[in-house]
Image: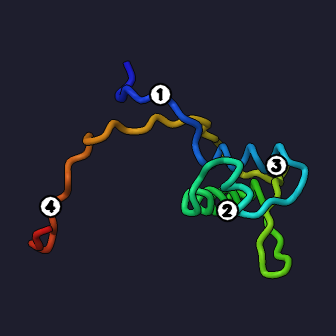
Amino acid sequence: MPRTKNPPKPTWTSLIEHELNSTDDFMNVAELMAKTGANFNQATAALHHLKKRKAIDSVESNGRLYWFATPSSDTRVRTVEQRRPEDPGTRKTRRSRHGLQN
């Protein structure tokens, strides 16, 4: 039985990677955000992870970064295609370590 009732959803990293692999061209962050529905933080976090693992690379032109897939040099051992979001209210709020009240 799953820990949460929420249905599985694709990860932002898998969505970004899929878009870059499926297109045969360079894409910038704005185009990736429009295609995947990710916000800026989600898109850049996924791009950072994929670049760190050499699944993608980037080139700069006129002050803008353009991203492209490099699946042959991917160093990841495991990929997670789906995640299950947590139910709201499942985590307890932390007490402040400094005695400050919210």
Q: Secondary structure at mark 1?
A: loop
- Residue in the foreground of this view, choosing between 1 and 35: 35
Q: Which mark is residue 7?
A: 1
Give, as a three-letter code, the residue at label 3. Answer: Pro
Q: Earlier in the sequence, mark 1 or mark 2?
A: 1
Badge nearest the viewer, 3 or 4: 4
Residue placed at 69% from the left, 49% from the top?
16
Residue 60 location in percent, x, y? Answer: 82, 75
Badge nearest the viewer, 1 or 2: 1
Residue placed at 58% from the left, 62% from the top?
40
Mark 2 sits on what residue? 52
Above or below: residue 64 compared with residue 74: below
Above or below: residue 12 compared with residue 10: below
Q: CA distance from mark 4 to mark 1?
A: 31 Å
Mark 4 sits on what residue? 95
Q: CA distance from mark 2 to mark 3?
A: 13 Å
Q: CA distance from mark 1 to mark 2?
A: 29 Å
Q: Earlier in the sequence, mark 4 or mark 1?
A: 1
Q: Secondary structure at mark 3?
A: helix
Q: CA distance from mark 3 to mark 1?
A: 29 Å
Mark 3 sits on what residue? 71
Q: Are marks 3 and 4 in contact (CB under 8 Å)?
A: no
Give, as a three-letter code, the residue at label 2. Answer: Lys
Q: Is residue 74 left or right of residue 40?
A: right
